[in-house]
Amino acid sequence: MERFLLLSLAFLLLALAPAAAADKRRPIKVDDLFKLKRVGDPAISPDGAWVAYTVGVVDLEANGSSSTIWLAPTGKGEPKQLTTTTKKDRRPGWSPDGKHILFESSRSGSMQLWAIALDGGEARQLTTISTGAGSAVWSRDGKQIAFVSTVFPEFSAKPYKESDGANKKKQEEID
């Protein structure tokens, strides 16, 4: 836990360093806050050698933000960007063997679960649920993933395909 707190503090200081290096004679402005990268969601690998985390940026012109997943060694070495998107990749979680990272992403339009191998390649989408998926965790053996998806209760007793279609239709009516 102490290691986690130290890493979190280090990432916070790294995120604030550019602002501290700016002209010290003027007060901070709201626009300065939008220029800061936001570091969050740290997750330490099972062997303790790496930390996966997110880096978020604000796009004022598009009136939005995006976030990507990065990896940094807990020892010496440079961080490296793992995912690239103009959407949101968030909440990275390590597979028990440390070879994959499971994460939530909006790159397909709604928040779904994705996984990416650390040895390279593209991220692959794991879920296509009309109401989205999140808060995922790996089983201890790495063979299953548990997650949360909000559904309308009146459709929860139906088979998945029927329930998912009904949830999608009701959500579209609400929207």
Image (cartoon, helix red, strand yellow):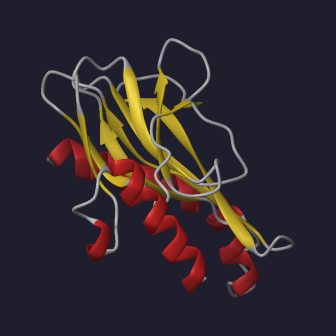
Quarter-wise, where is residue 142 in the image?
A: top left
Q: Nearer the viewer, residue 54 or 85?
A: 85
Decide if residue 29 is in sight here: no
Decide if residue 75 is in sight here: yes
Residue 15, how many percent across, how many down? 55, 57
Left or right of 83? Residue 30 is right
Q: Residue at x 73, y 51 (%)?
A: 86
Q: Residue at x 30, y 23 (%)?
A: 49
Q: How many marks?
A: 0
Residue 66, how many percent across, how many down? 66, 58
In the rendered image, the residue lying farthest to the top is: 119
Residue 148, how many percent across, how many down? 29, 57
Left or right of 6? Residue 173 is right
Left or right of 164? Residue 81 is right
Please tell me whether residue 151 is drawn above or below residue 158 in the rendered image.
Answer: below
Q: Residue at x 24, y 26 (%)?
A: 48
Q: Nearer the viewer, residue 135 or 70?
A: 135
Q: Quadrant of the C terminus?
A: bottom right
Residue 52, how many percent across, how many down? 41, 37
Please tell me whether residue 108 is drawn above or below residue 59 in the rendered image.
Answer: above
Q: Nearer the viewer, residue 74 or 88?
A: 88
